[in-house]
Structures are given as C-alpha cells and as structure tokens.
Image: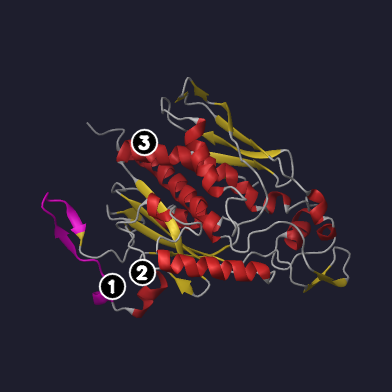
Amino acid sequence: MGNSFGHLFRITTYGESHGGGVGVVIDGCPPQLEISAAEIQFELDRRRPGQSKITTPRKETDTCEILSGVFEGKTLGTSISIFVPNKDTRPQDYSEMAVKYRPSHADATYDAKYGIRNWQGGGRSSARETIGRVAAGAIAKKILKQVANVDIVGYVKRIHDLEGIVDPHTITLEQVESNIVRCPDSECAQRMIEKIELIRREGDSIGGVVECVARNVPKGLGEPVFDKLEADLAKGVMSLPASKGFEIGSGFAGTLLTGSEHNDEFYLDDTGTVRTTTNRSGGIQGGITNGESIILRVAFKPTATIRKEQRTVTSTGEETILAAKGRHDPCVLPRAVPMVEAMVALVLCDHLLRHQGQCHTLKP
C-alpha cells in the first residue's frame, strides 16, 4: 500500500531486486518538458551498482527505457512509465536467507507483516527499489531547474568517524563526482576510501551522513500544518533504505544555543529583498521556504547484510548462525548521494506545483 509518494507530482515504484526488473510510474508531470532517456540515465549511472571498488560488485548497466508519457522528446502530461531490467541476478546466493533472518534487515518484519516474502536479495526491501526514485528525480530536477533555476547537490559529509569539510554554498556536482566516495574534501575522501576497503576485507560494514543543499529555492513552498516542507523532506529521505536520522539547518546542534544565538535576523539586500544574516533555519521557517538555501543531513546505518558470523533465528523459530552471502555495499553512502538528491527533488517539485496551483490561480 505504501508504494506511492507525492501529491500533484506523484510517483509509484515497482519491482524486486532479483525479479524481472524495477521501475516507476510518474503522474502529474507538466506537458512539453523536454526530457530524454540519456538525462535520466546520467542519474541512474551515479546510483548503479558495480561503479567502483568500494561498492557492491553486482554488474548492472541499469539501462532505462521510457515506455510511455514522452513523445518526440517531450512529456505529454500523461503518466510516464520508466523500466529498468535486472540482468545480473544471482538468487541462489540467498538460499540460506530463505529461512535465516538477517540481523537488522527486513526479513523478519516482512514475514511478520505479510506472512510471505521474496528472499531473493531482499525483494522489495532491497535498495534496488530506489532506481525508480532516482529516475523520477531526474525529471523533477529538470522541472525545478527550468522553472526556478533550483540547484540540488548532495555529497558524503561523514563516513564512520571521518568528516569532510565542505561549503554547501559553493559545492558543485563536478567536485562531488571527482572521487568514488563522493566527498568533495579530497584529503578526507582518500581516508574514507581506505577505511571502506578495510571494512570490506573484514566482512563488515560502516555508515555515515549525506548532506544535501538545494539552492535558489523560491519562497513560499510548503503546506502547513501537516505538510510543512521539512516534514515532507524528512518523510522522503527517511523512506530510503538504511536511513536512520534527519536534520535540517542547525539540527540537533541548535539545541545547545539560546534563542538570541539561534534566531536568523532579517535584513534587506541591495535589491530590497528580505534575507537572513544566518541560516540556522535551513531555508525553512514555519514549514515554508524563505528563499535561503535548504541544507539537510541524512544519517545512514551500516549495511545490514555482512559476511561476519552473527546470531539469528530461522523462520521456523530455531536459533542459528548466519554469515550472509551475496553482493552488498560495505558502505551505502557513495550510492546514497543521488538517492537523497532525488527525494529532495521529488518533494520540492511536488510542492512547487502545489504552490503554483493554490497561490497563483487567482493572481491577476
């Protein structure tokens, strides 16, 4: 029941990790947007497995096919369907996990909820589901760029105890893509790569934090009270596999400040536009964008499936030991970057359309 996301710009993802393929249906995309499979493929290539020595060795090209909703290079305003076939499947790697629950994975909870699950690679709970989100996010990004020049850039801020120094106001996609860990701090990135390689050799995994900035976001986006923009952003990124925490602006560090220290004071810039001297609000006040950059962070846990032996139980209620097989990322952070960007884009695009519909319909 929870396979759809968004209101006016709405997506529904489908497919399992080792089934025939995965994809997305997008409803509400405005007509006459120029879009190509190549533009979508660019984002999917950033997400795909097997792209470097620190990601899962599963070899998938993740080649997308636009099945509907686009004609002669432009969107029709009708449902857009995008499909990506699974090619490098090895369901036999998961035969032991058909009965043995992986600690901290979704195996036990899927059984508890549905009484049946696809144990081949985790089925629907696999991060392969995010292909549909990233494909739809590519379209949302283009709408935001064309309509409002919105720029969304995510990057790895921290892996385990290593934290990079990054300026969210000046960071570029080229800097993010300059290394395989997607941390623009090149010195810290090298140490991150070395740590991930060490963890992989040990058969273990580590987590970290992805930071994302959205610049040039128009004022007025957000729908109080239950659809405040930060609430929808939190829902979007926290629906990603392995996500465990969300912060925006000052986040939890803001609790250490007083009100006078934390408040973003207003001023008028050279054009007479209302701005804030600081941005501890993270670009959102009262659930509505204020025109400053949106800066958020998402915490991702260590990958649940590891090769080290762990205690577990079987689906028939017997205690046992599991050393999981299969091909998995020792750290999800590098591939999580385009996933976070996609969810931020989907939320902002949806709210842009909602804002235009409600607040501009009766404007002269």
- Count of numbered badges drawn on the protein: 3
| Colour convention of the picture | secondary structure
Identify the disc placed on residue 262. Answer: 1
Q: Secondary structure at mark 2?
A: loop
Q: Position of residue 58 (x, y in %)?
A: 68, 50
Q: Residue at x 52, y 34 (%)?
A: 27
Look at the numbered discs 1 and 2 and tell me whether their residues touch, using CB distance below 8 Å.
Answer: yes
Q: Is residue 270 magenta?
A: yes
Judged left or right of residue 65, residue 267 is left
Q: Is residue 282 magenta?
A: no
Q: Earlier in the sequence, mark 3 or mark 2?
A: 2
Above or below: residue 30 compared with residue 211: above
Q: Amino acid at mark 2?
A: Ser
Task: State the CA–CA distance, disc 1 to disc 2.
Answer: 8 Å
User: Comparing marks 3 and 1, which lies closer to the viewer?
Assistant: 1
Q: Residue at x 85, y 72 (%)?
A: 320
User: Comparing marks 3 and 2, which lies closer to the viewer?
Assistant: 2
Judging by the rendered image, the residue that carries numbered circle 3 is: 357
Say which quarter of the image contains residue 35: top left
Judging by the rendered image, the residue that carries numbered circle 2 is: 250
Q: Position of residue 133 (x, y in %)?
A: 55, 45
Task: State the CA–CA distance, disc 3 to disc 1.
Answer: 34 Å
Q: Secondary structure at mark 1?
A: helix
Provide the residue span drawn in magenta: 259-275
